[in-house]
Amino acid sequence: MLLKNKKILIMGIRNKWSIAFGIAKTAYDNGAKLIFTYMGEENKGKIEELISEFKGSKAYVLDGASEDELVKETFTKIKEENGKVDGIVHAIAHANTEDLHNDFIYTSKEGFSHANDVSAYSFVLAARMAKELDMLNENASLVTLTYHGSTKVLEGYNVMGIAKAALESSVRYLAENLGKDGIRVNTVSAGPIKTLSAKGIKDFSSILTVVEEKAPLHRNVTTIQVGNVVTFLLSGMSEAITGQVIYADSGYNIMGI
């Protein structure tokens, strides 16, 4: 098993359809002990039921993944109760609905800042806090999630494309900063998946159809398939890989039309 006796923190689990859940399942099946963060104390019961199949796992509420003090408080508690971790998976992103439904040119300053704070800065913050709190074991791996809209214009993705571009650039700079400590940082660009977040993208179903038609493998990806790639990046099998955007999209990104 690739992650036997490894402790993995997964930030941003929401429901069984989320990519974070697919990652959790593959990591757990490969021997990982799982720790989660989620939003909303009112969701505690739902989250505990959701992760109940991952025996021995724990969940911690984190209502502000881009708020320095809240992340520090939560990470301190996680370390005190679980010790150091071997990997962190960042599965957090958000943009205001109106900024996804209107043309990008109408993005507000608040909406622009919000999308980048929650979707990109939160990963930088998680990496910094983990380092400052000495929370990472030797050879730890950090993985976040991005999407093809970071480099190509996709109708309805709008400000999230900007945020994901910032996230990908952050991965490269973090990889350089943390590489001296033996810590790897990568991101997985997943193909479109029917998640709760995806419902906010206008005409999302048409994107699924295009990928199925145009991708070399002529199929969409699943949360488990993305989870398999993330599990690989968390494991020692990928010890020579850092600062990379790894596509798990049935090859769609290589197509010109």
Image (cartoon, rainbow, N blue to C red):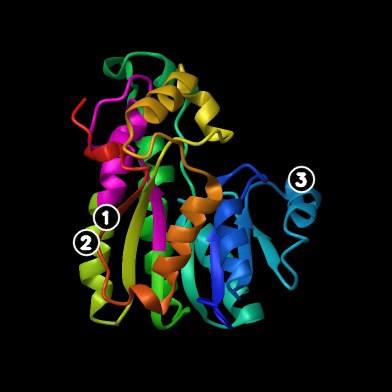
Q: Residue 124: x, y in percent?
A: 35, 58
- Tell me which segment is drawn in magenta: 143-168
Callouts 1 and 2 close, C-beta under 8 Å: yes
**Amino acid type, callout 3:** Glu
**Amino acid type, callout 1:** Ser
Q: Is residue 65 visible?
A: no
Q: Is residue 228 left or right of residue 252?
A: right
Please tell me the numbered disc located at residue 173.
2
Give the foreground label among 2 and 3.
Answer: 2
Q: Secondary structure at mark 1?
A: helix
Q: Residue at x 28, y 74 (%)?
A: 178
Query: Which residue is nearer to you in this view: 133 or 23?
Result: 23
Q: Residue 197: x, y in percent?
A: 53, 34
Query: Which residue is nearer to you in this view: 132 or 4?
Result: 4
Q: Residues within 10 Å of mark 2 (few under 14, many from 20)?
A: some
Work out how far the residue at label 2 is from the one at label 3, CA to CA, in angstroms. 36 Å
Q: Residues within 10 Å of mark 1 (few under 14, many from 20)?
A: many
Query: Which residue is nearer to you in this view: 228 or 154?
Result: 228
Please tell me the numbered disc located at residue 42.
3
Residue hosting label 1: 170
Q: Residue at x 33, y 34 (%)?
A: 215
Quadrant position of residue 75: bottom right
Q: Is residue 192 visible?
A: yes
Q: Residue 128: x, y in percent?
A: 37, 67
Q: Secondary structure at mark 3?
A: helix
Q: Is residue 92 left or right of residue 63?
A: left
Q: Residue 227: x, y in percent?
A: 51, 56
Q: Earlier in the sequence, mark 3 or mark 1?
A: 3
Relative height, residue 5 to residue 68 (above, below) = below
